[in-house]
Amino acid sequence: MEKIKLNFINRSGDTNNSTVVIFQQNVAEDFGEIAIAWQVIKNCGRLDNHPFVYSSNFQVSASDSYGNYTPQLTAYEGQAFDMLKSNSGDILQLSSIPATSSTEVEVRNQLMLGAINAYCYRDGKLLAAKTGLAPGQKAVFEFQPRIYIGVVSQIEEGDVMNSAIISQVNSEINLFGISSADIVMTGGGSGKSSVPFYFTLENINR
């Protein structure tokens, strides 16, 4: 399934205009250390909805020590990309040598000098990053078709979330085999009647 159509619906009793964050974990890295806020839903009032798309493909890019950013290149599992110096300067290109694993995507620093940062995007929004890759080092990206969703305060799209923030997000949604679905948020409320937020899939199409 190339694109999954998702629709967030707020059916909660929230009275604090809470911010909802959605992210993925790079399973090629140590789980739970950091993640990037991929989607951030704000000001979504009770019974409002917020549609968005999850594409199966993602893009990679890199930046060099001079502050230059390469174009985003669509990446498929098993591919590797090399950051190297060409006649025009530093460029990122598909490598003839595949990734070590057929389920992963690699971004390699093949420059003689200077560290690079590797970035991963899904649907035009930053999904994951690996910074400070010295020459000869590589970033490895692998994502399973599942997202994590929760209520977090003071977060913006593209922000790095540490383990303390991630620990507040305990709803995992498996998108495997789904073409479209509603993500419904319930719970919330004020005072003694307040209950934890809860996220469920409804109107699932496969």
Image (cartoon, rainbow, N blue to C red):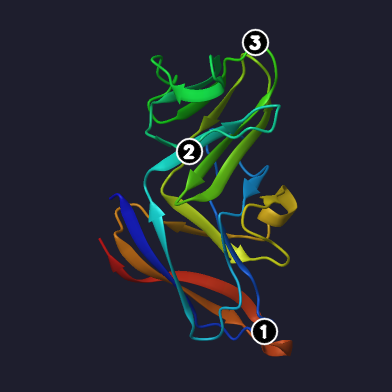
Amino acid of disc 1 = Ser
Neighbor class of circle 2 (other Cα within 10 Å; few <14, some 14-19, many 20+) is some
Q: Which residue is mark 1?
A: 194
Q: Which residue is mark 2?
A: 72
Mark closest to the chain's N terminus, 1 or 2:
2
Q: Nearer the viewer, residue 161 or 58?
A: 58
Residue 165 pos. (x, y %): 71, 56
Tag 3, which secondary structure?
loop
Tag 2, which secondary structure?
loop
How far apart marks 3 and 2 lie (CA) works out to 22 Å
Neighbor class of circle 3 (other Cα within 10 Å; few <14, some 14-19, many 20+) is few
Disc sitting over residue 66 in the figure: none
Which residue appears at 68% of the width and 42% of the height?
A: 33
Neighbor class of circle 1 (other Cα within 10 Å; few <14, some 14-19, many 20+) is few
Residue 157 pos. (x, y %): 62, 57
Mark closest to the chain's N terminus, 3 or 2:
2
Residue 42 pos. (x, y %): 60, 72
Disc sitting over residue 112 in the figure: 3
Q: Nearer the viewer, residue 56 or 125?
A: 125
Amino acid of disc 3 = Met
Q: Nearer the viewer, residue 18 or 201?
A: 18
Amino acid of disc 2 = Gln
Residue 197 pos. (x, y %): 59, 74
Tag 1, which secondary structure?
loop
Q: Is residue 201 above or below residue 32?
A: below
